[in-house]
Image (cartoon, grey):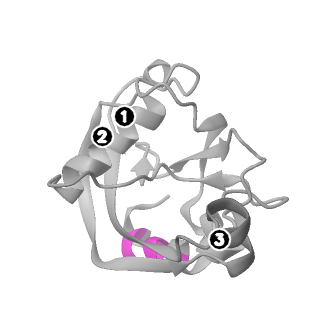
Amino acid sequence: MLLNPAGLVWIGRRANEGLVEHTAPGHEWQMPQGGIDPGEDPLEAARRELWEETNVRSASLIAEAPDWYAYDIPRAVVGARWKNKWRGQTQKWYAFRFEGDESEIDIFNPPAGEQEFAEWKWERMERLPELIIPFKRPVYERVVEAFKSLGA
């Protein structure tokens, strides 16, 4: 979770709306997220994923969620996208304070080469669960609960 000085959270609208595991009408928004490489520290993975998806480096750690949070991917999505290979994901969440200028945020030229987001905005933390695809909503509710004292 990336928060600006006003306590609003950075969210992006998924660039590839054709991927059924990431979008549903009205629920195309999410925070940056990604995988942890073998041997990589979860905090460093969070910093790397934030940078790879937004170009943001000017961010300092302000909190760590107390637990790992998991969600299951609906069977229809698993079958359609991954031929029943994956079942879900377990995530570790961190909150960072954005300390740069908004010109640093560049979703159109990501350093990793794959554009994740088509647009971005700052949003009130309590609105995040209603903007995410429904099967990820319980995780977002827990993340919001963990970090609610940091929001606007």
Say if mark 1 contacts mark 2, CB within 8 Å.
Answer: yes
Q: Which mark is residue 51?
A: 1
The residue to which callout 3 is attached is: 78
Q: Secondary structure at mark 3?
A: helix
The residue to which callout 2 is attached is: 48
* In this view, 48 is above or below 65: above
Crowding at mark 2 (Cα within 10 Å: few <14, some 14-19, many 20+) = many
Foreground disc of the pair 3, 1: 3
Depth order, front residue of 68/98: 68
Q: Secondary structure at mark 2?
A: helix
Residue drawn at the location 26% of the way across and 51% of the way down = 37
Residue 94 pos. (x, y %): 31, 60
Q: Quadrant of the N terminus?
A: bottom left
Q: Report, in whole angstroms, how far the alpha carbon at label 3 lies from the one at label 1.
A: 28 Å
Would residue 34 be counted in the magenta stretch? no
Residue drawn at the location 58% of the way across and 22% of the way down = 108
* In this view, 126 is above or below 121: below
